[in-house]
Structure formats: C-alpha cells, structure tokens
Image: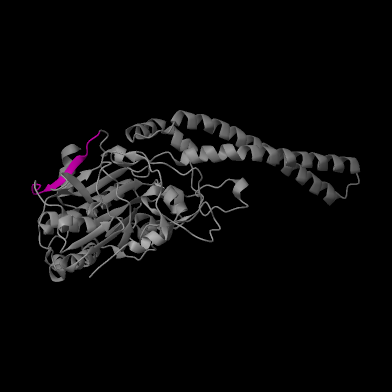
Amino acid sequence: MRRSTKFINNIIRTPVNSSFHPIGYKFQSRPVSALYITGDKAKETYATLLPYMNFKSTFEQGHELERSIRHRHMKSNLNKIMKMYTYYKDFNEKITQLEEERDAIAKELRQLNKEGSNDENMINTLKEKGKSLRNDLKRLKENFYPFEDEFIHMFLDLPNQLHSHCPLGEHERLLYQYKEPLTNGKCHLTQTNFVEFIDNTRYYFLDEAAEFDIYCTQAFTQYVLQKGHFIQTANPDFVRCVLLEANATPVHYYHKVMEEHLQDQLNTAFLTGGASFESFLGAVTKLCVYPSLLPLKWVSCGRLYEKALPMAKDDKQNLFTATQSNAVQTFVAASTAREAEEQMDSILNLCVDFYRNFNIHFRVIYAPAFRLTPSESLRAEIEIYSPHQKRYICVGRVSNYKDFVSRRILFTGREEKEYNFLHIVGGPILYTTRLTAALLEHEQPFLDQSHLFAMISTDSSTDVKKKPINEFKNLFK
C-alpha cells in the first residue's frame, strides 16, 4: 500500500519569503480582507460574511486585551486602534447626519408633492440642497473608505482573550504524563521497509505502516463516536479565505490554490483537508441553533494539509514535518464557557485513554500564550517524545476559542437582536503520520486492524468526566 501527496505540487503554491521564528512562523495578516469589505470594493466583489463587531464591549476590556497582546508577543498597537475608533465614530456620525438631512428633504418634497404645492422656488431650493448633500455624502464616504478599511482590518487582527489556565511565560504547563520518555532511538527514516520519504509533500508508507495509518484513524473515529457520543461528518477539502480570516488562521498554515478563472481576488481558496478545523466552519456559518440542541459534537476523519512549523532553521524534512497526514478532527459548539471547558476536558480524556494503548511515553500540556494563534484562548497538545530528535512532537491538539470565532460567522437565537454566541472547542486530536513515525523510533510493533478496533470494545470506561486530566487540573486551581 502506497500513498503520495505529489499531486499537491500541481495545484498549489507555497508562500515565499516566510518569516522564520524559533517556534514557527510569525502570525501575519493579509494586506486586504475578505471578511470585511468596504463600499468602494463593492463593484469588484461582495461580502460573504459580516462579522459582529462590538467595539464598545471590546475596548471596555482593554486591560485584558492588552495583556493578551503582550503575552502572545504580538505587535498590535491597542492605543492607536482606540484612537482610530474615536475618528471612526466621528466619521460615522457625520455620515449619519448627512443621511438624515437627505431623508428629511426627501420627506418634505414628498409632502409638497402630495399637497400639490405650486411653490417652484421652494421645490427647486430643496432639490438643489438635496443634490448638494448627496455630493457631500459621496465625497465623505470616498474619503472614509480607506480609513475604515485600515481601522476594521486592525480591529479584526486583535486576538482573543487568554484563558485563565493558559501559561503566560515561556514554558508549557504539564497536565498529564504517561510512562517515562525513551532517551535513545534511531531516526524513523532509516526504517526503509516501512517508509519511503522523498520530501514534505511526497512520502510513502509500506506494509504494516500503511495499514496502521489507515486503520488507526478509523478506529479512533469509532472510539470518539461511541465513547464521546459525537456525530460523524464529512467536510470539504477546500476552504475559502473568508473562513480562514474568520478563525484568524495565518494563511501560510495552508496551501493557496491557483485558480485560473478567479472572479474574487480577495476570497481565494486554500487546500486544508476535510479533517481541518476550518472545514467545519463552512457548515456552521450563519447557523441558527436552538439551545436545546447544544452542545453540538462533531468529528471528521480524512486528510489534513497543514504546514509543520520548524523548530530550527537547519531542521531536516521528515515525517514530523510532512504536509499531509490522515487526521481525526473534533468540533464542539457549546452554549456557555463552562460547558466548553467541560467538553475540552472530555475530549482530552478520550485522547488519554486511546493513546495509552500504544504503550509509549506521551504527555498532555497547555501551550504557552506566545504559541497560540490569535483566535485561540487556550490550547492543549498531546505530545510524544522523539528519542532521535530529542524533543517533543505534537501528535494531536484541542483548542478553546471561547466565542471569538462565532462572533465572526454565526449566532444562536430566534431573532437577530438576540446574539447568543456559541463557545467553540476543537482540533485535530490525531496526526497518524507523526504517530507512525514515533512508533518507528520507539521500535514498537504496529497494531493491526483487529487490535485497533478491539480497543473500542475492551475499554470499560464510560464516564469521561472523572479522568486524569481533571485530577491534574485541580493541582493548579
């Protein structure tokens, strides 16, 4: 059995001159936005989504926002954005005033016409005044569009608030650890009877490794469905940029698709895979959900095309940095922050139960704030130690987004004025490519199909709330 990602080279273009960072790429936004489009661009494209922007509430929590920016090592200038907001309000007030004056004149003209007035001087005076106001309004809007574009773009780049459990320093916080790490091991690429590696976009699993790569994904999905009571979905492999912006996903995480007849230059397509978090967002965009249906618990298995972040400039390509992987992706929408936290713990406990079956060392940690994407409030990572590279490799993760994402794409409630934003939790809880590489370095035998699916029936645990993750969290409350 062989698998390749060679076809990717024919349909994507990787970004050039990407900024290097010791732990990955610096988070940089695009110079244009597909999420918020000003009126001067209306002839070229249209707004697919209109994010809910509560400026007053956001700036009232300026202290927490400034704290989030500082610990994430971001360069956002909050004071400048707040000053721009003052000018933004003034502009909008002037526009509103002119529009009200125009409406008053139009109403007066309609009234004169209804009464059959013959006062030509008054009618002509009102018409000239209406034309003058229309021209003034047009000029004001034209001058306002560039400023509005800059301000809204900077506002949308503001990050989510940090969760109270998120580490603020340079080090992660340990949640759970299973066994002790193996200190010595050979590089997984030396085991050519199981893997043929060419580069990050082209590699092949052979024999038992290929079977494990497929069956492990299927077994873990069934495990989550039965033990966690999730609903399985199938998602598209391609996502429009507007959804990446809604999730504040750095666009260099994924591969841009080169479209020949692209009508919308702003809302371009990216190859993410059906097992990506962003592919779920298209299904729930603008979704109106009754509270009685919450929490929504979905899981998807399939491809995940995600660029691995290098740990050093001289990092050599291997299965830990491969572009494509089979993956299991979870997505949970909850009604409250507390319910979202409980669902996150539940997912992590499922992961702990499943990963212990591989009989190798792994740990669960909270990633420090500077490693989070702008939309993440908290991220837990499942890591396996690479005895060859002498570092931990992330083989799965779960993130808490609070209501940051839903404010940009969806709301719940029967009326539009009743904004009850969902709290979103989710992430790829299994990268089979990285797990396979870790098992090769630990020289552990691959579990076959029968053993993998036997995990589902033999595991007797049914209460995923009273698990190790919850016990460890009590230590630092």
Residue 53 vertical position relative to residue 453 in the rendered view, above or below: above
Visible residue check, residue 420: no
- The colour style of the image is one colour
Residue 20 falls in image quadrant: top left
Q: Which residues are magenta?
A: 170-182
User: Residue at point 85% right, 39% down?
Assistant: 125
| Residue 396 left/right relative to 12 | left
Percent of width and height locating residue 326: 27, 61
| Residue 21 left/right relative to 238 | left
Query: Which quadrant is the N terminus positioned in?
Result: bottom left
Percent of width and height locating residue 199: 28, 56
Visible residue check, residue 355: yes
Query: Which quadrant is the C terminus positioned in?
Result: top left
Taking depth in this image into account, of 136 and 118 the one nearest to the observer is 136
Taking depth in this image into account, of 332 and 355 the one nearest to the observer is 355
Percent of width and height locating residue 84: 53, 32
Specify whether residue 174 is painted magenta.
Answer: yes
User: Residue at point 14% right, 71% down?
Assistant: 450
Count every numbered label the image shows and give the total: 0
User: Residue at point 60% right, 40% down?
Assistant: 145
